[in-house]
Amino acid sequence: MSPIKQAARTARAGQELLQASGDVIARRLEIVAEGFRDPLKADLLEMSLMGSEKVEALTASATVGLNTAVGMAATTAAAVARETAAAQGALGAVLKASTPAEAALAQGAWVTAAMSRAVSDGWAFGSTMLKLQADALAPIHAAAVANAKRLKR
């Protein structure tokens, strides 16, 4: 999925989450008020879900975030190693150059390649962050939308 489509999809899910959350909060406040009015008829199952569902959804979201962070750390470490090796190779080429022009050419080739890799890595990082945003929002969105449907009068 393109980054633009991913961002648009996540924005729509965020809007749905806000609407569903408002609906769920409003209905659950009514349930709590009804429980205070008549404790013997309180919807204890629904009241118990108010906490456990949040913990489940937030745990799933945090798991996605943690797994993505671990993957991004590994990717970053690989990029650092790659760039260190490229810089060492470029330094070696500059030091082996027999003329200043050869040294400048070696340095210029390294800079051009490094900038290309930086742009590519930047796009990949941005894409990963967009996917992380969507994936981390998904369990919270799913729980809120399901609750809104279930609690709808």
Image (cartoon, rainbow, N blue to C red):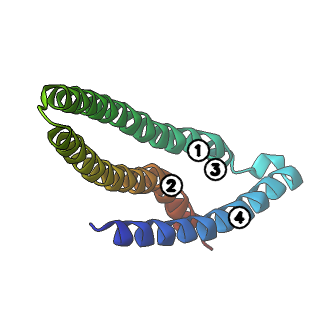
Residue type indicated by callout 3 = Glu
Q: Which residue is mark 1?
A: 54
Instruction: Look at label 4 and name its amino acid.
Output: Arg
Q: How far apart are the two marked residues, 3 and 2, measured between alpha carbons? A: 14 Å
Pointer 3 with pointer 4, Cβ within 8 A = no
Could you say whether the residue bearing mark 4 is in a helix, strand or loop?
A: helix
Compared to 32, does 49 lie above or below? above
Above or below — where is 153 with respect to 108? below
Residues at discs 2 and 1 in contact (Cβ within 8 Å):
yes
Closer to the eye: label 2 or 4? 2
Residue at numbered disc 2: 143
> Which of the two labelled residues, at mark 2 and mark 1, occupies the earlier sequence position?
1
Check disc 1: other Cα within 10 Å, few if <14, some if 14-19, many if 20+.
some
Q: State the residue position of label 3.
A: 46
Q: Which residue is mark 4?
A: 27
Mark 4 surroundings within 10 Å by alpha-carbon count, few (fewer than 14), some (14 through 19), many (20 or more) = some
- Disc 3, disc 1: CB below 8 Å? no
Given this view, does label 3 or label 2 mark the residue nearer the observer? 2
Q: Earlier in the sequence, mark 3 or mark 2?
A: 3
Depth check: give the residue in front, 116 or 11.
116
Sequence-wise, the earlier of marks 2 and 4 is: 4
Which residue shows up at 32% across the image and 35% down it?
71
Question: Split into 4 quadrants, where in the image is the C terminus?
Answer: bottom right
* Residue 98 position within the rendered picture, expressed as x and y whole percent measured from the top left: 11, 31
